Amino acid sequence: MTKFYAIGQLSKLADCKVSTIRWYEERGFLEPATRTEGNQRRYTDKHVTTLRFIRHARALGFDLTEIQKLRQLNGCCYGDHIEADTIAQQHLLDVRDKIKRLQAVETELVSMIEDCHYEKNHQCRILEVLADHDLCETDHKAL
């Protein structure tokens, strides 16, 4: 026997806001819910599983395009694990690149803060560096 959940119950089960559930459903990330005679949405365990999959992938930083592709690959065909691995490997490279950029930003911020001795010379090093990128000590890209 299939168990049905109201949107509020699904929200609690998947730790997800009701508005987010509606958003995922409207954009095709979550199959449309069945409706009661009173037009209330009713979800199944499959919806719970799908929503948890999406939420976990989002928590790991996968973008919505990657998540959609991974969902399509999930349980479809034998060779799909290779494509899923490729998506995950590329995501890992992107994460490592972001980490490097964040570390450069951290280094720059530490330097700016440590060099800011406005009480001595009435100049704020932070404001100087922010106004002139050439004063930066690291080569950091925008995130």
Image (spheres, rainbow, N blue to C red):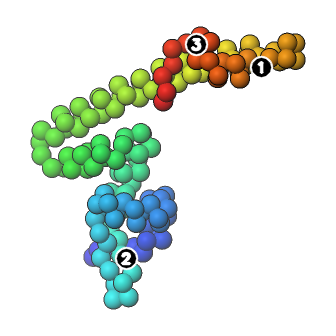
Which residue is nearer to you in this view: 136 or 91?
A: 136
Q: Is residue 71 left or right of residue 57?
A: left
How far from the left and from the top, in percent, is residue 38? 38, 88
Q: Which of the two discs, 2 and 1, labels the residue nearer the N terminus?
A: 2
Q: Let me know if residue 138 appears in the view.
A: yes
Judge whether 135 appears above or below 20 on screen. Answer: above
Crowd tier of the residue under label 3, counting other residues whose Cα lies within 10 Å: few below 14, some 14–19, many 20 or above: few
Judge whether 87 appears above or below 41 on screen. Answer: above
Between marks 2 and 3, how big is the CA–CA gap? 56 Å
Identify which residue is drawn at 28% across, 65% down: 31
Judge whether 97 appears above or below 59 on screen. Answer: above
Closer to the eye: label 2 or 1:
1
Identify which residue is drawn at 36% across, 84% down: 39
Q: Residue furthest bottom?
A: 37
Numbered disc 3: secondary structure: helix
Q: Which of the two discs, 1 and 3, labels the residue nearer the N terminus?
A: 1
Q: Which quarter of the figure is the N terminus placed in?
A: bottom left
Crowd tier of the residue under label 2, counting other residues whose Cα lies within 10 Å: few below 14, some 14–19, many 20 or above: some
How far from the left and from the top, in percent, is residue 103? 54, 20
Q: Which residue is mark 1?
A: 124
Q: Is residue 33 left or right of residue 116?
A: left
Q: Which residue is mark 3?
A: 134
Q: Which of the two discs, 2 and 3, labels the residue nearer the N terminus?
A: 2
Q: Residue furthest left?
A: 78
Q: Is residue 115 left or right of residue 50?
A: right
Q: Which residue is mark 2?
A: 41
Q: Residue furthest front?
A: 131
Callout 3 amino acid: Asp
Q: Let me know if residue 74 appears in the view.
A: no
How far from the left and from the top, in percent, is residue 66? 29, 42
Callout 2 amino acid: Arg
How far from the left and from the top, in percent, is residue 21? 41, 63
